[in-house]
Amino acid sequence: MSFSLDSAGVVHPNGQRALAGVTLAARDGERIAVIGPSGAGKTTLLRVLGAALRPGEGQVQALGQHPWHLPARALKQLRARIGTVHQAPPIAPRLRVVTAVLAGRLGQWSALRALGSLFYPSDIAGAHEALARLALEDRLFDRCDRLSGGQLQRVGIARVLYQRPALLLADEPVSALDPTLAHAAVGQLVAQSESTGATLVASLHAVDLALRWFPRIVGMRDGQVAFDLPAAEVTPALLDALYASEGGVATQGPMPVAPLAGTAEPTFHRPDCP
Ligand SMILES: Nc1ncnc2c1ncn2[C@@H]1O[C@H](COP(=O)(O)OP(=O)(O)OP(=O)(O)O)[C@@H](O)[C@H]1O
């Protein structure tokens, strides 16, 4: 079992309830998309799964451990095995791209190596390889504040690819990318899950991407699991009900992207790289 939640509930300090009675589990290597309207609790769910937020109610297990029963050192070690792609990556603006990517393994390195990597990047080839998967290898030594929002989001994805976590959580990982880039970037996350056996959980507003790339879809609404189904069983009627208060945006969705050719890993195509 990769993770399990048992009747998990979260009420934020301001009294806002974000999760209520969520029971959910995933086997190792599963790929799950979490969809639902704004405010449904998707980010809160991912924070609980990532051992970043302690649920006030219920139980959580991640990678075979109860995070909140662990001593501080063991909790840190558990967190180093969980990778999160944030919608807006928490990357210091003055950092070089190479350093931002290598930071993916900071939790796995000794304090000395981690400190040293801030000044002398120790695995440039590794960072280059991860960035190449997002077509950003030519920005290796740029400062992060010279990147666009979408490029920065791709750096955040490269960082988690470099980390090679056992549980990969992605919170709206492609919200700043155009449909073609979004398709390729989600494809890279899926390819990573397939090649490393990592469990992948991604929250996505782009329902077409969720249905295309993820075998299992969890629909959330009002902090609860509205449905948990194989992608093939998610009907337009279910989506309409899920997004009802948003005027049916789910079925309109973003512009569809070209159909996949077989199961080949998608690649980025740039105008200068035919
Ligand atoms: N730090 C916080 N303090 C107070 N309330 C919060 C906090 N974070 C989230 N919430 C509230 O909890 C609920 C769930 O928020 P959450 O961010 O998990 O939803 P979401 O489905 O990820 O939304 P979106 O799709 O807009 O990102 C919302 O009502 C939100 O306002």
Image (cartoon, rainbow, N blue to C red):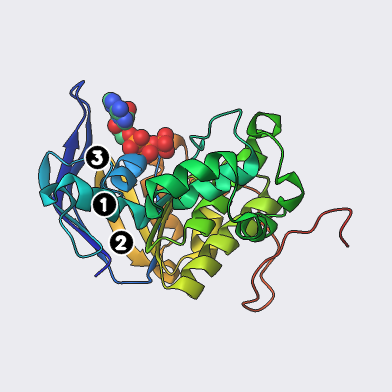
Q: Label 3 is placed on what type of residue?
A: Leu
Q: Residue at x 50, y 74 (%)?
A: 195
Residue 39 location in percent, x, y? Answer: 35, 34
- Report how far apart the C-alphas of labels 3 and 1 lie in the structure: 18 Å
Residue 99 location in percent, x, y? Answer: 58, 43
Question: Considering only vertical position in the picture, is 20 above or below 209?
Answer: above
Ligand 1 rendered quadrant: top left
Q: Is residue 121 left or right of residue 114?
A: right
Disc 3, SS = loop
Residue closest to the far bottom: 262
- Report how far apart the C-alphas of labels 2 and 3 lie in the structure: 23 Å
Residue 207 location in percent, x, y? Answer: 51, 53
The verdict on label 3 being within 8 Å of ligand 1 is: no
Q: Is residue 63 left or right of residue 152?
A: left
The verdict on label 2 being within 8 Å of ligand 1 is: no
Q: Which mark is residue 228?
A: 2
Residue labelled with disc 3: 53
Residue labelled with disc 1: 225
Q: Residues within 10 Å of mark 1 (few under 14, many from 20)?
A: many
The residue nearer to you, when weighing 267 against 159, is 159
Q: Is residue 187 left or right of residue 31?
A: right
Q: Label 2 is placed on what type of residue?
A: Asp
The residue nearer to you, when weighing 80 against 231, is 80
Q: Label 1 is placed on what type of residue?
A: Val
Q: Residue at x 38, y 51 (%)?
A: 110
